[in-house]
């Protein structure tokens, strides 16, 4: 969803697009600072692993990034229509349509296969964060 050019890393433009698509309004300078903080190579690009490590560190230390964490959780809740803590295939399809990223059934199945780590047929919050990259 986020890595538009499929190079395995997210650049600033891709991150801004994803946040905007999810209705998260955040100043460009803050996005730039967060990207720099998350990029372990300090090259302005963030891999999935770098992003997940950075998110885990933010959960441990708290701080100013709490708003971003709240925004990501709010975005998850937009996808999780019934509020049960999981995103089903139908909920994912509706949410992708809602944010202007319609997907085919094949793409939907591929997204679920790639992100459903525990193979329970639905996406939890941790898996949701991974799908963004």
Image (cartoon, rainbow, N blue to C red):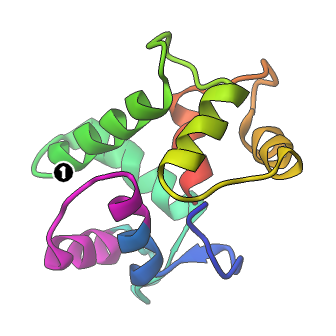
Q: Residues within 10 Å of mark 1 (few under 14, many from 20)?
A: some
Residue 44, percent across and down?
40, 85
Q: Position of residue 50 (x, y in %)?
A: 50, 63
Highlighted range, magenta = 18-37
Q: Is residue 99 above or below residue 82?
A: below
Residue 129 vs 124, above or below: the answer is: below
Whether the magenta-drawn stretch holds residue 32 is answered as yes
> At numbered mark 1, what does the secondary structure look like: helix, strand or loop?
loop
Out of 64 and 30, give the one closest to the viewer: 30
Q: Nearer the viewer, residue 12 or 52?
A: 12
Q: Residue furthest bottom?
A: 43
Q: As drawn, is 83 to the left or to the right of 107?
A: left
Asked whether 21 falls inside the magenta stretch, the response is yes
Residue 41 vs 65, above or below: the answer is below
Residue lying at 76% horizontally and 47% vertically, measured from the top left = 111
List x then y, in percent, for residue 10: 52, 75
């Amino acid at each position: 969803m986020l890595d538009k050019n499929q190079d395995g890393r997210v650049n600033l433009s891709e991150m801004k697009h994803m946040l905007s698509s999810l209705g998260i309004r955040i100043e460009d300078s803050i996005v730039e600072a967060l990207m720099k903080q998350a990029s372990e190579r300090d090259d302005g690009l963030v891999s999935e692993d770098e992003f997940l490590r950075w998110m885990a560190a933010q959960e441990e230390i708290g701080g100013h990034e709490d708003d971003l964490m709240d925004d990501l959780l709010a975005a998850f809740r937009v996808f999780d229509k019934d509020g049960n803590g999981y995103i089903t295939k139908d909920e994912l399809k509706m949410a992708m349509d809602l944010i202007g990223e319609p997907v085919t059934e094949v793409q939907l199945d591929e997204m679920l296969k790639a992100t459903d780590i525990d193979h329970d047929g639905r996406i939890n919050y941790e898996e949701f964060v991974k799908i963004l990259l």
